[in-house]
Image: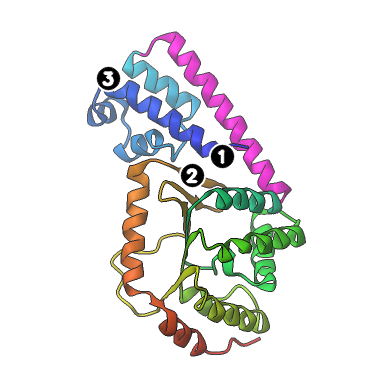
Amino acid sequence: MTDPSDRRLEFGDRLQQIRKVRMTAKDFADAAGWQRSKISRIERGQSLISDPDLTHWATILDVPADVVDELRAELRAIRLDDARWRARLRRGHESVQWSFAEAEAKAAKIVVFESWIVPGLVQTPAYAEAVFRSMAELKDGGRDVAAAVAARMQRQAVLYDSTKNVQLLMTEAALRNPLADADVMAGQIDRLVAATALPTVRFGIVPLGVRLQFPPLNGFWSFDDSALGVETFHTEIVTTDVDDVQPYNRFLSAAWDVAAEGDDARTLLLRLPRIDG
């Protein structure tokens, strides 16, 4: 199933192209009584325009009725896609894991940054189970925890593929504010120590206390420096727009500059205090 965010991006881009022919963003904001940020979110596919707002938008721009009908039909289709996507997430995490596995198999370069959890490709089964159970409770869905854990473990075979460029970056904060109990975290830290020695993987940890050039607002992943995804509580946003991808690449470059790798990462991990059970 296609991620509905792709259709949102295309729809927003079409709205932008129509608007640009008739008005600048500033002129339109003044005429509509909207904030510029609202226009930007809609045109970049980050927010879906409402039916009343679409009518208001079309009236101000004097958009032909047949074009408005096409746009309204596409808007309905996107909402249906959104509903199907949410239903997929409610059905379970396993299908999402297999979608990632398929994308990872095709990609030459895989990059993952996580700010508050351990990257999935180096999670232990027990830690992955804790993550999936936590998300299932949050989203009130995805109860197929055992199947999702098994799928995630199978995905980890990509770590040993010498044809892949795999880069995994996380924060020390994810280990200092754990999602699992002491025994699970002890096993997870051992797994990360082993990950620092994988010859096919670049693994790093952004330590607490280092000065960051850019704030790590959220975790994200990318394939081949082109497709980028950000998971939120309610959906997953995917983009291939160069302008969207560039800030994440700049963040990564700066974060790697201060990250602990190799022996430094192992030292950091081994010095972590034991978590009270």
The amino acid type of the residue labelled 2 equals Val
First in sequence, mark 3 or 2: give its number: 3
Marks 3/2: CA–CA distance: 27 Å
Q: Are marks 2 and 1 in contact (CB under 8 Å)?
A: yes
Q: Residues within 10 Å of mark 3 (few under 14, many from 20)?
A: few
Q: Which residue is mark 1?
A: 3
Provide the secondary structure element on which disc 3 rests. helix
* Residue that label 3 marks: 21
Indicate the quadrant where residue 127 lies.
Answer: bottom right
> Which quadrant does the N terminus fall into?
top right
| Amino acid identity at mark 1 | Asp
* Residue at point 58%, 31% (across, down): 79
- Residue 125 circle label: none
Q: Is residue 23 above or below residue 265?
A: above
Q: Does residue 22 appear to the left or right of 110 in the view shown?
A: left
- Whichever of callouts 1 and 3 sits on the residue coming sooner in the sequence is 1
Q: Position of residue 83 (x, y in %)?
A: 63, 36
Helix, strand, or loop for circle 1? loop
Q: Residue at x 64, y 75 (%)?
A: 180
Q: Is residue 131 above or below residue 48?
A: below
Residue 11 to residue 167: above or below: above
Query: Can residue 141 be seen here?
Result: no
